[in-house]
Amino acid sequence: MSKPKIAFICVHNSCRSQIAEALGKHLAADVFESYSAGTETKPQINQDAVRIMKQRYGIDMELTQYSKLISDIPEPDIAISMGCNVGCPFIGRPFDDNWELDDPTGKSDEEFITIIKKIEEKIIQLRNKLK
């Protein structure tokens, strides 16, 4: 049986969803496939997220990931919203879960690390649930 495809969705696909994709690949590649996407794209992944993920996990998101639209990824089995503070992106169907994470863009490293740790916990919970 093929592994379920999980899509982590936020509006710009430049920060939280990219972190979730990277941590999903890092921590749960044996259980599910991780993708991230947005309803809009940014020219590059959030540079604070890139720097902190390199420091904490040794993961260079810019090597394997880029900002992409929902139409650019395979049809997901599970779609997870990173948090809709402004408004949930429409993906053609309801989200399976909303992680309700604040966007740390423009905030301190401490706030980034708090969000990254929350994403890591959620990825591990999801991995354990789907195992």
Image (cartoon, grey):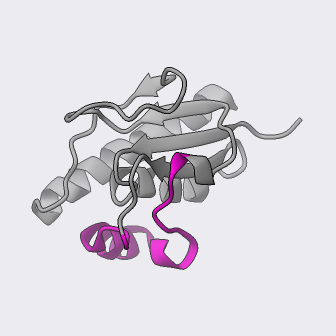
Considering every residue shown, the one lying at the far right of the view is 1
Image: magenta residue range:
43-70
Residue at screen point 19% across, 53% down: 104
Q: Magenta includes 100?
A: no
Q: In x, y percent, where is residue 20?
A: 45, 50
Closest to the observer: 87 or 35?
87
Q: How many marks?
A: 0
Question: Is residue 59 in sight in this rendering?
Answer: no
Q: Is residue 34 left or right of residue 82?
A: right
Question: Is residue 54 in sight in this rendering?
Answer: yes
Q: Is residue 94 above or below residue 20?
A: above
Dividing the picture into quarters, in which one does residue 54 lie?
bottom left
Q: Quadrant of the C terminus?
A: top right
Residue at screen point 39% across, 53% down: 40
Q: In x, y percent, where is residue 96?
A: 51, 22
Q: Magenta includes 53?
A: yes
Closest to the observer: 118 or 75?
75
Q: Is residue 13 left or right of residue 68?
A: left
Q: Is residue 94 above or below residue 64?
A: above
Q: Is residue 51 above or below residue 8?
A: below
Closest to the observer: 93 or 114?
93
Q: Quadrant of the N terminus?
A: top right
Residue at screen point 41% across, 57% down: 19
Q: In x, y percent, where is residue 21?
A: 51, 54
Q: In x, y percent, where is residue 97?
A: 45, 24
Q: Is residue 39 left or right of residue 29?
A: left
